[in-house]
Image (spheres, rainbow, N blue to C red):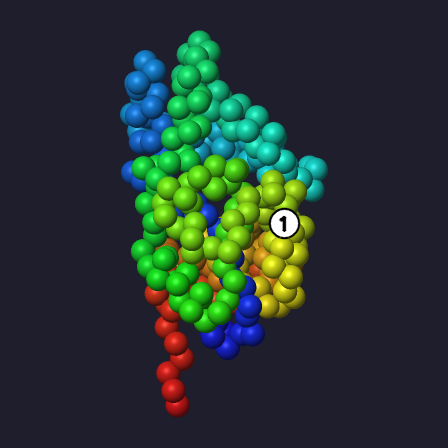
Amino acid sequence: MPIHSLSLKAVFFDADDTLFKIKGGVGAAYAGILHRHGLVVAPDQLEKVIWRVFQEWNGEYLNSSQQYRADHKRDFEWWREFCKRIVAHYGETPKPEELYDELYYYFERAESRELNHAVTDLISHFRDLGYKTGVLTNNDKRIYKLAEELNIDHHFDYILCASDVGYRKPSPHSFEGARKKVGFQAEQMLYIGDNLHDDIYGATKAGWHAAWYNPEQKKPHIEGVKPTVSVRCFSELIKKPTAS
């Protein structure tokens, strides 16, 4: 279904891997900081460890056992413990708090990310159409500073992290919290994200339309989950219908 055929009033975006990605990869980002604190690890090896730790602890991150409830204090505590588990994988003694502080604040700075191609063009396109625009992310409150540093905050009417609305994606309560902020009906909302489960399943379950940012053109692997549209690049969403 073409996006321009929908009766939309608001468009929200996921953050990491949709609006932007980690510059140089997550392994390189962590490796540079760990190196300064005396732990030398190859970035590609470290990236594997990071994702393995994340997968092992993903249920705790999403808090699925508590219906995906989220709050800012828990965000910070989870992230700090996540970093400590990564370091502990190398059998190191506990590192000084300065290491964890440096890791934490690095990921709220513009130098940690790069914008995906045509994303600002797409946001401007939706604003030109008169839509409200926003961010809804499972990232923590560092998203506010990050959006400001990347100079994209002015493109959005709303920037919300999960803990602002009290629930993580894919909970429909997360999307409902964002919907209430703008005051439109669910069928007037579009969500754009890269994660089929958290973004597309969550949005469609809440009654939103969903555009799957799918550069690798993966096949949907969750039964019953069908995005409104799947695109390889954002420029596909800017294209207007050809006049007949």
| Residue that protrudes farthest toward the bottom in the picture | 244
Where disc 1 sits, the SS reads helix
Placement of the C terminus among the 4 image quadrants = bottom left
Q: What x and y, as percent, mark residue 68? A: 65, 41
**171 relative position to 121: left or right:** right
Q: What x and y, as percent, mark residue 178? A: 61, 53
Question: Residue visible at 34% across and 49% down?
Answer: 115
Question: Residue visible at 57% across and 60% down?
Answer: 225
| Residue that protrudes farthest toward the right in the picture | 66
Can residue 25 be seen here? The reply is no
Number of marks in picture: 1
Q: Amino acid at mark 1?
A: Ser
Question: Residue visible at 53% across and 53% down?
Answer: 158
Q: Looking at this view, is 224 or 17 the one in front? A: 17
Can residue 142 be seen here? The reply is yes
Q: Looking at this view, is 181 or 239 the one in front? A: 181
Q: What x and y, as percent, mark residue 107? A: 40, 34
Q: Residues within 10 Å of mark 1 (few under 14, many from 20)?
A: many
**148 relative position to 77: left or right:** left
Q: What x and y, as percent, mark residue 217? A: 39, 59
**23 relative position to 160: left or right:** left
| Residue that protrudes farthest toward the top in the picture | 93
- 137 versus 107 height, above or below: below
Question: Residue visible at 55% across and 68% down?
Answer: 9
- 193 versus 242 height, above or below: above
Residue picked out by circle 1: 174
- 84 versus 192 height, above or below: above
Task: State which quadrant residue 69 falls in.
Answer: top right
